[in-house]
Amino acid sequence: MGKKRIYELAKEINVSSKQLIAKAEEKGFPVKNHMSTLGENEERQLRAAFKPKAAHQSTQATGHPHRSTTTARGGQSTGKPAQRSTDRAAHASAKPQQKQAARPAQQNQGQQSNRTTSNAQHNKNNGQTGAQHGTHNSGTGRFGGSLNNNTNNNNGRRGGSSNGRGGRNNRNNRNNRRRNNNNNRYKKNQRIKDTNQHKGAPERKNKALPETLVYTDGMNAQDLAKLLHRSSAEIVKKLFMLGVMVNQNQSLDKDTIEILASDYGIAAKEKVQVDVSDIDKAFDAEMANTKHLVTRAPVVTIMGHVDHGKTTLLDHLRHSHITAGEAGGITQAIGAYQVHYNDKLITFLDTPGHAAFTEMRARGAEITDITILVVAADDGVMPQTIEAIHHAKAAGTPIIVAVNKIDKPGANPNHVMEQLTEYELIPEDWGGDTIFVNISAKFGKNIDELLDMILLQSEVMELKANPDQNGAGSVIEARLDQGKGSVATLLVQQGTLHVGDPIVVGNTFGRVRTMTNERGRAIKSAVPATPVEITGLNDVPEAGDRFVVFDDEKTARAAGEERAKEALVKERQNTSHVTLDNLFDSLKEGEMKEVDVIIKADVQGSVEALVGSLKKIEVSGVRVNIIHSAVGAINESDVTLAEASNAIIIGFNVRPTPQARSQADSDKVDIRLHNVIYNAIDEIEAAMKGMLEPTYEEQVIGQVEVRQIYHASKVGTIAGGMVTDGKITSDSDVRLIRDGVVIYQGKLGSLKRFKDDVKEVKQGYELGFTIENYNDIKVDDVVEAYVMKEVPVK
């Protein structure tokens, strides 16, 4: 017989653990709490100590009639109250004796409260019997005095005795019953409470074990508990019994997991983990799918030297005027457009021709099917023309040469053909396989012939894709919009991209929130060879990154976060620090001066172009160090970083916020703003060479917030607003800023206050104004007034 605990013995003999512990301490047993164990001798003594009480309680439960009757009358003998009751029924003169006998009964009622409930019920039944049979039951019944008492109670209640003794007895009985019920209810609740305290929580019924435990390396006890349908505490205990000391959060190796599965009697199988962060592999898998292929539109990249007419050609194809909107007439970012011709679609990519945009041209060649090489007939082959040829050949795309500007005097298309033969681009008329088309993009000459050649070449290439699978493609451009957040221009190369798709783009992830085409119209899906602009990413991706659509958002998030971590680790590894090994080399380079630069631009491609161009500047004894580059407006964090590192901030097609400008003025941080990329490069190079001549510097004198727009047929758009900072003068230059991006630069057409022309309006006053040759003013636009001030060389 094993040792028994205190709470187990208490449950068996129907007493509380506290009572059992108190009794054990009286006997000198070494017990501390309800979990203490008892020996056989100790258990026997405790059982014996509580045995009489248990017998007494069982007698109460049995409820013999004569005991119940005796206790209900204050513990007196059965015969005495019966005789007194009989005398009272026969002789009225016996009332004083009964009154004296009733007093001790009332005094002893509280002492016998434990047995009153059963007695009261018994008396009630007997009283009803006595009422039916009259006085024949008095003193002679089987139950003796009990019947006499109940007879008296009934007589007192029904007969309305003048002395009220019967009514007082009934009230006493009712009070006793109420008190006894409360006491019994309290004791019952106390016993239930004591029992529940030692009973413990009910045991959980475990589910059946799986036939095979499919695990991954590094799982912890909590993960295994879910797979095995067991509690984590049980898993930890099982591992402890197997000699493995772990907690529920520690990772377990494969051997430990297999031993645990063997102990449970089930097989173990390791799950092969797929690297979801390798989107290049997923992209290649999507592109290699050859099922359900249908013909798709060709993707055509227009390349060539700067100012040879690439954007003008595309402008004519789209029947729009986008060249005028480009600063300096130069394309600053990749544009993606679709053209309908002969009931077919052609997707065009326009790449910048300036030398700074080499990487953007390389990306354009990688994602294209056909390359259109635009060469000016009056200018011939130029450096960027040669570079475009190399990019197209490296990507393995066929080249169609468009000899432009044949309408200009001095144009010589044959000379262009002769030059291109040096680069293995031989015209078909000369026995080669390269298509040449003489065009005039400005007047639209031979444009249809060029489109026919593009469609003919695409038919020969048999371009196909599967629109029924998850979307995959590449990033053409990316930027940070103040209202929309991260905005990315994507080219869908395989599958179909839908609004709401979970997507991983480079090192970013998200869900496609909105999707618009090149004309700004919202669309719900994009088939292969369609350029779209999406929002919903957690960060701005890099131009040229690939994107893949995942089946669920959880997997996409995991892949994106993992790729972001890997990129951060790689960036930290590339950061060089001074060590004892390279200290001497660093000291030798002490004569080398550095110009620290922070670059902020409107789109990612412009950031890359500026960074690459500035790093290539080589001036004896000076080099450029790019300490930070990002997309978006210049903010206070940029100024703080520039002040701490003594750096210059270069803003390309973006503006500083008012707070950033104020902080820059107080911290003496130099901010240079440009909208033509080679102006920024030339300025930095000239500064590095110490060749800066006296020049003019713009000085911002005020800002106006547009609050109301009025349209007049003769005047144009009239803007009403308030000067929020500084002042604005009638002869000042102005720039229109929308969401931190410069939209237009020009001069004021008029400046009025209360319908009167004024020369200036100061801060806090309202005004009305127009801008020369510009009407696209909107509410909440910011107009920045500035003057050009001559700054001497220091």
Image (cartoon, rainbow, N blue to C red):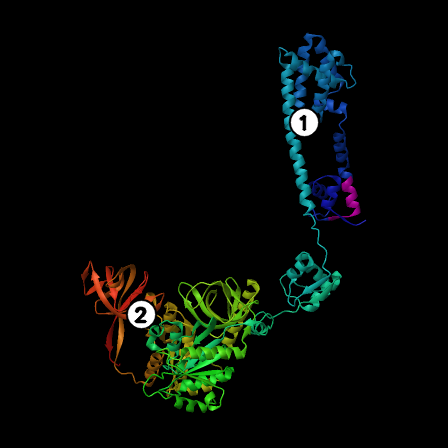
Q: Position of residue 600 (x, y in %)?
A: 39, 73
Q: Is residue 547 visible?
A: no
At 39% across and 64% down in the image, what residue appears? 482
Q: Which residue is mark 1?
A: 111
**Residue 659 falls left or right of residue 18:** left
At 65% across and 11% down in the image, what residue appears? 159
Question: Which picture quadrant has residue 222?
Answer: bottom right
Query: Along the polypeptide, which appears first: circle 1 or circle 2?
Result: 1
Q: Position of residue 268 (x, y in %)?
A: 72, 65
Tell me which segment is drawn in magenta: 37-47
Q: Which residue is mark 2?
A: 744
Quadrant for the C terminus in the image = bottom left
At 75% across and 24% down in the image, what residue appears? 67
Label for residue 750?
none
Magenta region's main secondary structure? Answer: helix
The verdict on residue 45 being magenta is yes
